[in-house]
Amino acid sequence: MFTKVLVANRGEIAVRVIRACRDLGIISVAVYSEADKESLHAQIADEAYCIGPAQPQESYLNINNIIETALGCGAQAIHPGYGFLSENPEFVRACVENGLAFIGPSEQSMRLLGDKVQARALAKEAGVPLAEGSDGVVCSLEEAGEWAQKIGYPVMLKASAGGGGKGIRVAERPEQLEEAYQSASGEAIANFGDGRLYIEKYIAQPRHIEVQILADQAGNTIHLYDRECSIQRRHQKLIEEAPSAFLSDGQRQKMCACAVALAQRAGYTSAGTVEFLVDDQQNFYFCEMNTRIQVEHGISEEITGLDLVAWQLRIAAGEQLDFVQKDVPMLGHAIECRINAEDAEFRPRPGTIQSMHLAGGIGVRVDTAIYQGYHIPPFYDSMICKLMTFGRDRRQASARMKRALSEMLFEGIVTNTDRQLSVLLSDAFERADFNTNSMEDGVFDVSNDA
């Protein structure tokens, strides 16, 4: 096992990794920007070093500064968390070339799965269902039009690179294709420096359901069941639950088996997530694979009792999984709400937390890096904590989440706890009757409930 690990991230995920290191007896090293000098992760780590100004490009995305800090403090490995450099294969290469273990997949696996066109081809080889679409990148608007006519409208244009909902546009009719093509390509260039697109059949009102996998370097791969991530706004997840209340046991088994098959086909190691779009008949189609720990990994931990971050560390150190699939239980149901510092229009609202009260009690977990007096900087994501509840079934987990949301109190900042509570109180959530468009369609407006 490693003796010292550098955590190349900030916020709650940095705190989460530091705690896992401490549980394993590993010395933790935090890095922080000038804006994060007073951050919790910098305070609780065994060592902490400033790596640059507030702007991410000069600090958390500065590969040279991070590598130099790791080498200078004697770290043996780097955990990237999520976001920032977590899915950057150049960062993986830099770690390896400097004798540092990267706590995640190999550069080769990351490159292969990070390119959505290559990932689709790999999924096809692994027998994973795909939505009908182009065989590869569409190189022009004319080629996109030919494919659209072949597979039929509506169609979705998607960036081959990147993720996070960027570079995605829908064309419902031929006259919308040009604008969708130019817009998706332009956004992809702006965010990823790569404007390549592919095209596939648009699945109307889909569910977004993903499977958590864990794989060691000896080829042992298991899944931790599925997560329902359909409550989104503009492709950004708001509420997740595990497992999905929509899937039948049979479809769940098939989906999980497909996720494992894809990971094995890619030679994947560490924790990863295979994402699917699911139609109203429970037919599922491969979407993408996230080659990192997910924001919502905690609810998979809650229903299985496994520590995913600890296993990332152990796998990177060469340990093999000491259990097989049949040993992974599904203990109950878990729900996560992402608590953001934002206003009613979903605009980020940084500020200073004058006072706060975090929820607690049986079945409640809060992963956060905030504290009373903490100033939320304006340079980073607006999520300030992840509120999770666990119960023997969905009803109990939901009841505990309503209770927990009601207990989350903040002064000095504005948060989305009221919006999250309104979703939990809606008939649509109670019936588990929603899809990725439900937030924009006003389905969760409690005033609309009969």
Image (tube, rainbow, N blue to C red):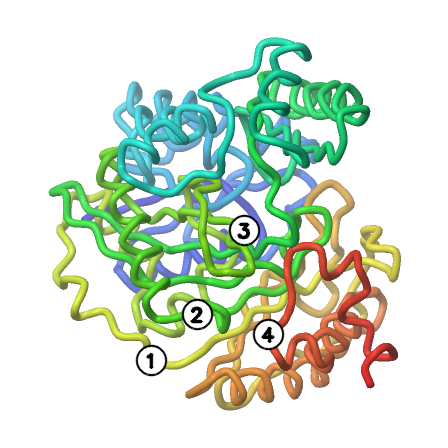
Q: Which residue is mark 4?
A: 432
SS state under label 2: loop
Task: From the viewer's perspective, tell me whether residue 35 is left or right of residue 13.
Answer: right
Look at discs 2 and 3 and give the one toward the viewer. 2
Q: Compare marks 4 and 1 and give the one earlier in the sequence.
A: 1
**Foreground residue among 346 and 161:** 161
The Cα atoms of the two marked residues, 3 and 4, are separated by: 40 Å
Task: From the viewer's perspective, tell me whether residue 355 is left or right of residue 368.
Answer: right
Residue 414 placed where, x, y %? Answer: 84, 65
Task: In the rendered structure, find residue 243 and report the number of the disc placed on it.
Answer: 2
State which quadrant residue 384 falls in: bottom right
Task: In the rendered structure, find residue 123 and report the number of the disc placed on it.
Answer: none
Q: Quadrant of the C terminus?
A: bottom right
How many neighbours does mark 3 have within 10 angstroms: few (below 14), some (14-19), or many (20 or more)?
many
How many neighbours does mark 2 have within 10 angstroms: few (below 14), some (14-19), or many (20 or more)?
many
Residue 15 placed where, x, y %? Answer: 49, 57
Q: Which residue is mark 3?
A: 42
How many neighbours does mark 4 have within 10 angstroms: few (below 14), some (14-19), or many (20 or more)?
some
